Image (spheres, helix red, strand yellow):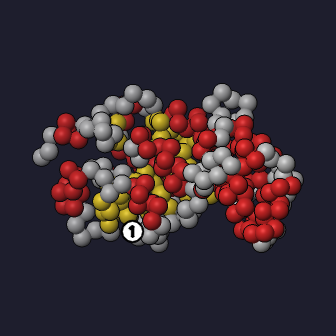
Amino acid sequence: MVHSSFFQDPLLDQIFMTDPEIIEKIISFAELKKTETVLEIGAGKGDLTEVIAGRCRKVIAIEIDERLRGLLEERFRGKNVRIVWGNALNILKTGRLHYDKIVANPPYAICEPLIKALFGQRFSSAVLTLPWRFVERITSNPEEPRFSKLSVFTRAFFRTEILLRVERDAWHPRPDTASFVVRLTPKKPAGMAELVLREMALQEDKKLRNALREAFVKHMKKTKRQASGALEHLGLPSRMLDRKISQFSCDDVMKVAGRFANEKKV
């Protein structure tokens, strides 16, 4: 048996959910079907993995901590579980995994890049356990203090439901914060403003000019030349168009989206 302190590595953010009742509730929220493939991000010691496996066709479980290899491979040998070793963020970027739903207690340290990595991914729902401060960020309304650019982008892609509060005693070792189980359901964009927000989120490392040009071409059926002309008519200053979206404030993002508030997808 491996001593539990072996897994308490702050660099890997390893904490494990030990409350079987909470695990069962998470599974019930996911509404799994026997025909579905489920992605789990952060398999840990496999307690959640095992319950998921009993309710679906296949589990693809991503785990970065090589120290868990022996434990997980022994536990799931011959079962409907595929363990993928590596960094979940890098693996998601490849687009090579195909799954119907996501069920996970992901490492708290990767919450923001994980949500961003899910933008544009194809799945029917994701049930995730996340720290409550982060949940506040992705669910805040404009009038609330934690409303941010991430709030805007998340809302453009998902309908977010807060399902359950998880206290610190449900984990080992005990984290510093309570958590919430949330469900993200991909939604159809309401109009051109949300389509523009999606392009901005997906191209956050690029200039606004490039993201808007892509939005015009993809969603308004314009040629590249027409898209360049349409950019000029938006009335946005060149200094904004030539800045990377990653440098934008929440107000900047809302200002850009506001230019498309009355536009519908063609």
Q: Residue 220 at what x, y percent from top left?
A: 79, 67
Q: Residue at x 27, y 50 (%)?
A: 65
Compared to residue 132, the image places residue 87 above or below, namely below
Q: Residue at x 22, y 61 (%)?
A: 73
Secondary structure beneath disc 1? strand
Quadrant location, the C terminus: bottom right
Compared to residue 86, the image places residue 222 above or below, namely below
Residue at the spot of label 1: 58
Q: Residue 118 at what x, y percent from top left?
A: 53, 55
Q: Is residue 131 left or right of residue 6?
A: right
Compared to residue 155, the image places residue 93 above or below, namely below
Compared to residue 147, the image places residue 193 above or below, namely below
Tell me if residue 48 can be seen. Answer: no
Q: Which residue is drawn at 78% across and 69% down?
A: 225
Q: Is residue 210 left or right of residue 181?
A: right
The answer to which of 64 and 222 lies nearer the viewer is 222
Q: Residue 87 at what x, y percent from top left?
A: 36, 54
* Amino acid at the residue labelled 1: Lys
Q: Residue 9 at what x, y percent from top left?
A: 26, 38
